[in-house]
């Protein structure tokens, strides 16, 4: 039986672990943490300067560290995943929601469900600045978040994917399931997002 390698993002000095699901402003958040609250990627016995989307956290650390996880509206996240993947793969030219079924493996709830009960703080993409400033170790309210969004206009325009394709909303709901929305505090309707 192969062992799953220990891998997580941690600041030993500030005693927190950052769980970074893809397409949830991870570059912005990790950049902020690395700049202000020394955070490294722990991979086995190595400490590396970059961050990781992977996490396999020892149980003792789940109980002794502050656990932080970034999240994003599931409709917005699926549109972002589609946009990202259609720009770099053979999906190019396939209209949304044509490849949405292939995005199920990127379910945010599936990603964080195993550690959900251990998460102390969620950083929502939609309220990123406010949520970061609520973290117990963030003392300086004047700290600026680095602008490292992949897009020049993050979070803008994703609803157009659903407006142009009325069946997309129900397809995303069916694929992700209600927990993806309700457990993470998001509406199951695009128009309410």
Image: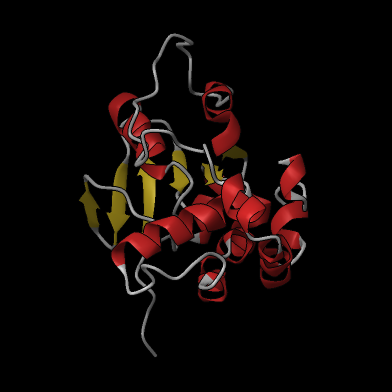
- Asked if residue 76 lies left or right of residue 41, the reply is right
Rendering coords of residue 175 (x, y %): 67, 72
- Position of 107 with respect to 19 (left or right) is right
- Comparing 18 with 151, the one in front is 151
- Position of residue 61 relative to residue 168, above or below, is above
Quadrant of the rendering where the N terminus is positioned: bottom left
Q: Residue at x 39, y 68 (%)?
A: 93
Q: Is residue 26 left or right of residue 110?
A: left
Q: Position of residue 61 (x, y in %)?
A: 49, 51
- The picture places residue 109, in percent across and down from the top left corner, at 63, 61
Residue occupying image coordinates x 37% and y 48%: 9
Whether residue 74 is visible here, answered yes or no, is no
| Quadrant of res 28 | top left
Taking 146 as reference, is 16 above or below it? below
Q: Quadrant of residue 126?
A: top right
Tally of numbered discs: 0
Query: Between 64 and 96, which is closer to the camera in this rendering?
Result: 96
Toward the viewer: 193 or 50? 193
């Amino acid at each position: 039986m192969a062992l799953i390698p220990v891998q997580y993002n941690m600041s030993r000095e500030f005693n927190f672990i950052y769980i970074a699901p893809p397409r949830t402003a991870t570059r912005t958040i990790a950049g902020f943490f690395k700049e202000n609250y020394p955070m490294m990627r722990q991979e086995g016995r190595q400490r590396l300067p970059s961050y990781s989307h992977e996490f396999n956290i020892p149980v003792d650390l789940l109980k002794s560290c502050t656990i932080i996880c970034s999240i994003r509206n599931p409709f917005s996240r699926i549109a972002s995943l589609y946009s990202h993947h259609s720009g770099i793969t053979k999906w190019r030219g396939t209209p949304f929601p044509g490849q949405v079924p292939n995005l199920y493996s990127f379910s945010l709830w599936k990603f964080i469900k195993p550690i959900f009960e251990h998460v102390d703080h969620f950083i929502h993409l939609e309220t990123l600045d406010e949520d970061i400033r609520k973290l117990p170790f963030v003392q300086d309210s004047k700290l600026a978040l680095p602008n490292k969004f992949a897009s020049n206009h993050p979070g803008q325009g994703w609803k157009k994917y659903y407006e142009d394709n009325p069946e997309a909303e129900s397809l995303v709901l069916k694929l992700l399931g209600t927990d993806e929305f309700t457990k993470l505090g998001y509406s199951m309707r695009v128009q309410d997002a």
